[in-house]
Structures are given as C-alpha cells and as structure tokens.
Image (spheres, rainbow, N blue to C red):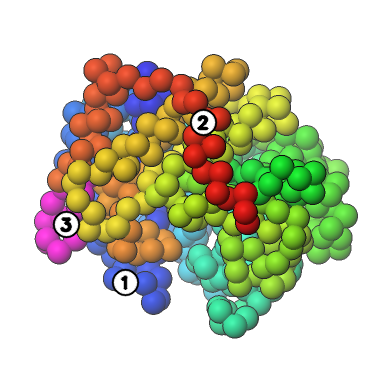
Amino acid sequence: MGYFRTLCYSCSKLADRAGITGNGDIASDGYHKYKEDVKLMAEMGLESFRFSISWSRLIPNGRGFVNPKGLLFYKNLIKELKSHGIEPQVTLFHYDHPQSLEDEYGGWVNRKIIEDFTAYADVCFKEFGEDVKLWTTINEATIFATGSYGQGLGPPGRCTPNILVNCSSGNSSTEPYLVGHNVLLAHASVYKLYKLKYKSKQRGSIGFSIYALGLTPATNSKDDEIATQRAQTFLYDWLLKPLVFGDYPDEVKRTVGSRLPVFSEEELEQVKGSSDFVGVIHYTTFAVTYRYSPSSIFPMDVEGFTKDMGVYVSPIGNSSFFASEATPWGLENTLEYLKDSYNNPPIYILENGARLESHSMLQDTKRIDFIEGYIGAVLNAIKNGSDMRGYLIWSMVDLYELLGGYSSSFGLYYVNFSDPGRKRSPRLSVSWYTGFLNGTIDVAPQDTIQLKRNFSSYSSL
C-alpha cells in the first residue's frame, strides 16, 4: 500500500491575508514542533511527507545571501524524516516569492524571475538533493496564474479592479497568460539545471503540478459535452500540453490571440519533455454547461481566463472549490483524461482532502468517507492502467489556509490554536488511515458509476 503511505502537511499556505481571520505567523507551529509531528507520521506508518521550501525563508532577498537559520531548519526537518524512514517530497514554490523581487521587477510577470528561480533551485538541489528524490517546481500552477493574477485572490493579489476585488494593480486579460508562460519557462530551466548538474549523482525526479478540478457535463447534451472538452483544454491542457508536446493548444491560441505569449524555437525545445511526473491537486468536481456567464469558480472574472474559456463551471451539490462532499468519479475522470491525452504520465496526487468547519469534532466520519471514496477512485485508476505513483492527503494537521484562514479544517489531527503549545489531538480519521496503512482496514475500488448517480441532482444546472 505504498501508494497511500503519504500525507501533505503545512507546505506554505501561510500567507498573511488581509480580511481573513488571524494570520500565518505561527499557525500550527511546525517550525518548532517538527520532531513531534514526524514522530506522529512514523506512528501512522507514513512512507512519504510533502512540504514546501519557502524561497523567502531560505533566500530572503531572492538571490545571493542564504539565511543560515532557514537552511538549518530544512536540513533538520529532512534529517528527522529520513531517520524515521520517511521520504521527503519537496515543492520549491508555493505562492511565496520574496517581496524584494516583487518590488524590483514585478515578480512572475517579468522574465527576470526565471534566472532568479533557477538560482534558488540550484541552492536547494545543492543543499538538500542528496536526501530529496522528488521535487515539484511550481505548486498548482494553473490556479496560481489565474487566481493570483486574474482574480487577485492569492498573493501577490493582482487583477483588473472590479466590483468584488479592488486590486491595486494588474491586468486580468493578459497577466495570467504571461505568468503561466514564465512559470513554464522557469520550470523548464530548473529541469535542465537538474538534468545537467545533479541528476546523474542525486537520481531524483522533477515534476510540475496543476489544480485539476473534476469536470463533468451538466447534462447529457452534446453542447455540454463539447463545453466540458473546452474546459479541459483551458484548465488542464493550457499548461500541460507545452510540457509534453511542446506548445499551447490550438484552441487556446485561437481564443487568446495576441495576449498569449509565444515560445521561441529554443524555448519550445526546452519546455517539451521537461517534467518527469505530473502532480495533481484535486478536491472536487464541477459541472460544465455551454451557457456562458461569469463562472462560480471565479464569479468576479468579467474578463480574462474564465471569459476566454467561455463555458459555465459550477460546483456539484454542496461542494466548493475545496470540497467537504466526495465526488470521487471526478478524480477518476481526470486521471483517465491525463492517461489518454498525455501518454500515461507518472502521476502523484499531491493534495486531496475534506474541508470541515474549524471547530469540527474529533469524530470526523465525513472525512473518512471522503478519503475512502477517493482512495477507491485511485485504485480504479490503477486498475485501469494509470501510472499512479503516490497519493497524499491534505493535511496531516490543521493549519492556516490561504483562502480561509482558520475558518476551515483539513487536518487529520486537530490543532488547538488557542493553546500556545498548539496541542495536536488525533481525529478518528487518524486511526482509520493508520488501519488502512497497516492492512486492518480494507478499501475496495469504488463503484463510481453508482456514486455519480447519487449526485444526479446537478443535471438541473
């Protein structure tokens, strides 16, 4: 059951967001409690642990000086994991580039970041690469580009000002595509660096991750089927197709036109084939209809990416961008699409988990049902030939969420944020998952067709 002996932890979703309850200055305090947390991981039987290295913590000015305290923390964390037989999985960028680079040249909207990001990755490979074999360059790149530069929801909060979000700067019609382009080039540059300088000795893998909503037609109509294909083109293929086949999808080119950056021949060659695996972040499934209006994914998007996509995408049932209601057939559909469209690439589910209220009880049976359903979907995908390499639950402990602060809970372990010691208490899901890993609890592949029928009410959208 090595596929499932993995968990996601706090990563870097600790940005201080104005208007959201509290801030991430301490959060679950993994900085001081990492030894305790690694012990809990080992007791559960985990084989892998995913976390992010904060560029800002390691190299505060973006380039040059390396912070010795930041370097020591990550070395100690990795050492602690390895001593307990737990493999570290590292994400290099999770929404937090140094403020100095934002001030100097605008961060990801400027091609200068490619060189700086590559130099930062070089430090990470040099310092940690002997013990880290799985690297993800950019976390959920699709949502980073569209959410942070089209909607203004994530840092640095850029968008065209609108009635819901008053961004101080940005252009929602151009910047998501510009940032997506620079993200691909930065990823490819890091991949090339690793291949030429480190891979022969360290023998690790470099991957790229997307936020992959499950997508399903809202009705059985041909129009909604075509609309779903178009949504897949924009939400999956926009950034994945260049990595595998070397250029943007024709449909995106036609729709976006001159707002879509163009690769040079040299860049096309460098980007193509520059990912050893695809990281999938998945929580929920959305229904797609051909009738366009500002999507409930991003209701404030009156121009830019969602308008370009040109279809209406809305959550099924009581789910949302981060689900509390299981729709596992959506993940199965996504994995089947990636298998068929991209020559069956190696895939890691880097995040999947259930959102409950922040003060939810320790008896989190709804989370157990959620996880069991998705594990069943992953087992189906493996049975159907998908090259699945790992499954990671978000998250091990409660933490500060980028879009929800402390209002929602994803942790298998409850964290008392009112307690200065940030005491951890196991929810029922801890014992369930431990039992699954040690073989005393069995999970069978899910009858996802029947599960989908249970949510048939979405067809009225």
Label 2 crowd (10 A; few <14 / some 14-19 / many >=20): few
Q: CA distance from mark 1 to mark 2?
A: 39 Å
Viewer can see residue 235? no
Instruction: Find disc 1 in the rendering and name its residue.
Output: 21
Q: Which mark is residue 450?
A: 2
Q: Secondary structure at mark 3?
A: loop
Q: As rendered, which of 268 and 41 lies closer to the eye?
A: 41
Q: Position of residue 75 (x, y in %)?
A: 31, 40
Considering the whole magenta stretch, tell me its main secondary structure: loop
Labels 1, 2: front one? 2
Label 3 crowd (10 A; few <14 / some 14-19 / many >=20): some
Q: Secondary structure at mark 1?
A: loop
Q: Which mark is residue 416?
A: 3
Q: Position of residue 285 (x, y in %)?
A: 55, 46
Q: Tell me which amino acid carries mark 3.
A: Asn
Q: Of the residues under marks 2 and 3, which one precedes in the sequence?
A: 3
- How many labels, in total? 3
Q: Of the residues under marks 1 and 2, which one precedes in the sequence?
A: 1
Look at 81% across and 64% down and name the residue there: 259
Q: What span is colored magenta in the figure?
A: 413-424
Q: CA distance from mark 2 to mark 3?
A: 38 Å
Figure quadrant of the N terminus: top left
